[in-house]
Amino acid sequence: MMRANNLSRLHVPQSPNKHRIMTEPTEKPALPDHLSADPRSPHHHPAIFEHDIGIRLNDKERNDVEEYCISEGWVKVPVGNSRDRKGNPLTIKLKGKVEAYYR
């Protein structure tokens, strides 16, 4: 599951009619080939993180994926609780068959 906690920093303007009832379900955007949970990355798409995303690597469910690329066949996962000097988690790249889907 990609981390959605980065979305708490985004400002969402309130609509004038707060009590509007939604009649149509929101359509989910297509999952990109390359997606990152880091908001500073050019591969970060906040609209996708509004939905729950699942990642499979070699037919096994992964819940700790920070970034993935389907065409190149890799995912980046954090290594324990280690952090770099800027406070970002240290990651390793695992290679294999990658599948992304909405839950």
Image (cartoon, rainbow, N blue to C red):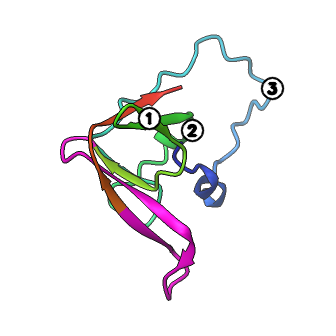
Is residue 11 shown to the viewer in this render? no
Residues in magenta, as a range: 70-92
Classify 10 Å Cα crowding around label 2: few (below 14), some (14-19), many (20 and above): few
**Residue underneath mark 2:** 50
The residue at 51%/85% (across/down) is: 86
Disc 3 marks a residue whose amino acid type is His
Disc 2 marks a residue whose amino acid type is Glu
Give left or right: position of 89 versus 30.
Answer: right
Give left or right: position of 64 versus 96.
Answer: right
Mark in front: 2 vs 1: 1
Dot 3: element: loop
Instruction: Please tell me whether residue 19 is drawn above or below residue 90 in the rendered image.
Output: above
Disc 1 marks a residue whose amino acid type is Lys
**Residue underneath mark 3:** 19
* 69 or 64: nearer the viewer: 64
Instruction: Please tell me whether residue 36 is drawn above or below residue 91 in the rendered image.
Output: above
**What percent of the width, then of the height, locates residue 6?**
59, 58
Seen as rendered, the residue at the extreme bottom is 85
**Residue underneath mark 1:** 60
The residue at 47%/51% (across/down) is: 65
Tell me how far mark 3 sits from mark 2, CA to CA: 20 Å
